[in-house]
Image (cartoon, coloured by chain):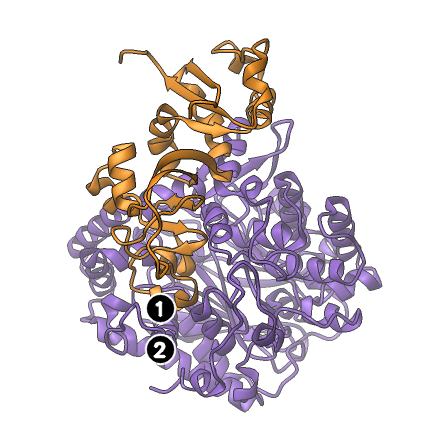
Amino acid sequence: MPDTPSLELQLPKDHLANFFPLFQEGVEVEVEVGHTVRQMLMEQFNISRDYQANRITTIFLNHKAVDDAAAALIEDGATLALSGAMPGLVGATMRSGGHLAAMRDGMTYRNPEQAPATGRGRIRLKLFNLLLPELAPRILLHGILLEPQRLRSLFAEQPESFHTGGRLPTADKRLWENEHLELRVLFGDRNP
Amino acid sequence: MDKIVRIDMGAEGGPKVSFEPVGEYAGLGGRAVTSLIISKEVNPLCHPLGDENKLVIAPGMLSGTSGAMSGRLSVGCKSPLTGTIKESNAGGQAAQVLARIGYAAIILEGKPKGDDLYKIIVTPDDVKVEIDNSLKMLNNYPLIEKLRAQYGDKVAYMSIGSAGERLMLASSIACTDPELRPTRHCGRGGVGAVMGSKRVKAIILDDAGRKQRAPKNPDAFRDANRIFVEGLRKHPVTGEGLPAYGTNVLTNVLNEAGGYPTRNFTSGVFEGGAKLSGESLAEMETRRGGKATHGCHRGCVIQCSGIFNDKDGNYLTKQPEYETVWAHGGHCGIDDLDTVAKLDYMDDNFGLDTIEMGVTIGIAMQAGLAEFGDSEGAIRLLEEVGKGTPLGRTLGSGAGITGKVFGVEKVPVVKNQAIPAYDPRPIQGIGVTYATTTMGADHTAGYAIATNILKVGGDVDPLKTEGQIELSRNLQIATAAIDSTGMCLFIAFAILDQPETFQAYIDMLNAFYGTELTADDVVELGKKVLTAERDFNKRAGFTSADDRLPRYFYTDPIAPHNQTFSMSDEELDGVYNW
């Protein structure tokens, strides 16, 4: 992202939850596309296979339920949503490879006939529920792309106590005049 | 729970109380008791608000014991909303207390002449039916406050608000929670109107002097309960997701799946979904000094409820469920949790089913009585219901009638009951259940996702489309079985994934009753209940033509998947083939 201005923040750990609304709506991340969901999460976010199998039990790719993360291919511009196990009949129905997958057959993800191109690309990533506190720190450390106004709005919505942990460098015009800025956030000590 | 108390509200000279042995209902609970009694004793052709209908109140098989998750209370009758048989259940303290007093069921029958309003006081020694006209037209919160002043805090209360007294078809029966707030409702099907038609305003359940029910085999029961609780605690849904976020954790996921019915089922995605999510709700509750984790009854391990405070930190209502947040939120185009919480409080206070009322307000918006997204408009419409104005009475009669009165073509109801928060077009399997359940559109009718362990009807290939009919059938059987034990349906998640938890559940039942139930026996109980319910509906005049979704679900595709409901009539008619 050579032309995208970047901003790095170091914030107290208890500020993490303030970023959860961003992840629920989705943030853009730059990744290697053309790979499977499992591969992308392992290689680019260092999310282990065990964690994926046990914790990321509900996955949507472009609004469609993914049954096999090791097969579903991510293309440039895709929207990927990750969730823990869900309650309810429909929650169970959405579970990856679950017993009730037939009940939502029409919205099950299937790869396109032509495999997507590989290379750098941007995807929209969403995190829900139990995965928010567990995965948001590493995604923020990786870096997310935001419209500057979303970041301004996020900070504007916080109570004064939040700002003692860090303020936005509003004077740096270069940050705020681009379509996107890259945000990296480190929580807690720099060298834990 | 070795006896049944029968109260003839229409007896000559005033209500007459009689007692009888539990008889053929011994060892049953919840939905099995309510549906088998209604099916046997109520003329299916009767008017639901007439003297021939009955209201049966039954605790679960393990209610009143130390068994976890055993506090569901079932209420059954012929529904004034659907005209079908109805079982509606709720948490709260009522089931535990009623079971400890020793009753397998309370049966309210007949209908008094005149306008007097009654309260019923149930104690281990006696059942009294007293006239108390000072309770007339009180809503649930002030009603319970008034009753607490007389009967105290060591009892459980069941009650109807003004909606039940006015015989509104969307009215509920409230059960108090551990804090004695009327927040847990037998909501669906207008059961509050049936209680209102019998002029019963409140039931006070007082188990003073009674201890927990004793199992036949205490050691085995204790061991099975321990394994059962461990299973619930270690499962990510019952041990983590539900306690942290409640059922509203589903909002983000359903919205992402494109199955979140928005603005009266015209889209599957709501742009304001994240603002309504369980994650946002839990954060707001915690920040305002409420609770994001709270049990609806004592003995609850999952604790999927919460306490919602207003902006000033004062109690407003319990944590609204996912279906409530959807009905008053996305379905009406509203993305403000404070509005949803206020509407939830009003529903509880007036005594209304939150799903039916939310869907009805959306229909009213479709009709032009308010704009989609108009929070004040939604509150104003619900206030009409509380006042009992002609408009309010129309709205309080539910989505189907409101749609007819205002000429709305597309109204999401099956057997006149509002379809809840999951669009059946992208999720066809739940559409099968909505269409064919004996209860009218009901998301909980096929909720017990333990079918793979129960092996109801054999294994189904999860990736084959044609499995949807079988799955719906199996889910409905398994749900009827769990409802009949009176356990909270949320145990189904741990049972689905953990065979040892399922076995512990069976072991609890066997240790308590000294029986040797197997999984097959549980399945047979589910089939027996469904067969009785189906037979009642058939005798009431329902046919396969009633087992259908509204036509527009077959013709109008919904974004983002642009699907219609595609299950054939022949397939739907096969659900009950066993």
Shown in orange, the chain is: A
Residue named by callout 1: A102
Q: Which amino acid does label 1 sit on?
A: Ala
Above or below, B98 relative to B377? below
Quarter occupied by residue B213: bottom left
- Give the chain of mark 1: A
> Which colour is chain B painted?
purple
**Which residue has dot 2 on it?**
B466
Residue B208, placed above or below residue B469 = above
Q: Quadrant of residue A103?
A: bottom left
Q: Given the image, what chain letter belongs to the residue carrying mark 2?
A: B
Q: Residue at x 64, y 39 (%)?
A: B338
Which residue is found at the position 31% from the left and 57% from the top?
A67
Q: Is residue B193 left or right of residue B458?
A: right
The quadrant the N terminus of chain B occupies is bottom left
Which residue appears at 48% of the width and 23% of the height? Answer: A4
Is B216 on the left or on the right of B417, as rendered?
A: left
Between A164 and B163, the one nearer to me in the picture: A164
> Which x, y percent locates residue B14?
66, 73
